Image (tube, rainbow, N blue to C red):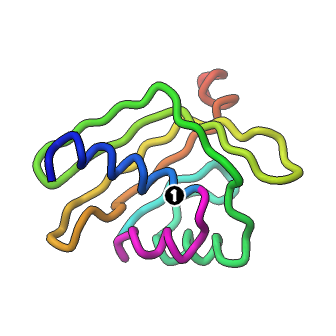
Amino acid sequence: MSPDSTEANLWKIEETSWTSGADFARSVTRDDAVFVFPYPAGILSAEASLKGLEGGEPWRSVTFHDRSFTRQGPVAVLAYKAEAERNGETLYTALCASTYVDDGDGWRLMSHQQTPAAMAEAGA
């Protein structure tokens, strides 16, 4: 896979993880992944984070802005501003970072972090 196709593939995985629900997210997440979400969720294991997605409504749409991609060997980091929508909810805006590792079985999520934009803008 060329570097350009790796980047495009990871952005597609990231978008699909937002909009497709627990089954897809589980298929691209390492068992030892770590998630950092705003309070009250906090720091979660892969198991706890994926369990939280089960039965929940995935985001209807997500748009990424200010994209940044960095890769060093088998590790790649995506950083971006997300704007996501769910039916009946206000627009969710957050600064996010996801780390993927190519562990020989393809690229899998190792960590994901979200900071709501209101918190980031306030310096919290």
Range shown magenta? 19-31
In the rendered image, the quadrant that contains the N terminus is bottom left
**In the displayed structure, does residue 66 sit left or right of residue 106?**
right
In the rendered image, the quadrant that contains the C terminus is top right
Task: State yes or no: residue 20 in magenta.
Answer: yes
Percent of width and height locating residue 10: 34, 51
| Disc 1 target residue | 16
| Residue depicted at 83% across the width and 41% down the height | 90
**In the displayed structure, does residue 80 sit left or right of residue 18?**
left
Percent of width and height locating residue 105: 20, 73
Say above or below: 119 vs 22.
Answer: above
- Specify the amino acid type for callout 1: Thr
- Going by the picture, which residue comes out furthest to the right? 88
Residue situated in front as seen by the camera: 16 or 31: 16
Residue situated in front as seen by the camera: 105 or 97: 105
| Residue depicted at 71% across the width and 53% down the height | 60
Q: State which quadrant residue 31 falls in.
A: bottom left
Say above or below: 89 vs 42.
Answer: above
Percent of width and height locating residue 35: 48, 59
| Residue depicted at 57% across the width and 73% down the height | 22
**In the displayed structure, does residue 72 sit left or right of residue 122?**
left
Say above or below: 28 vs 47.
Answer: above
**In the displayed structure, does residue 95 sit left or right of residue 32?**
right
Task: State yes or no: residue 78 in magenta.
Answer: no
Helix, strand or loop status at disc 1: helix
Percent of width and height locating residue 7: 28, 43
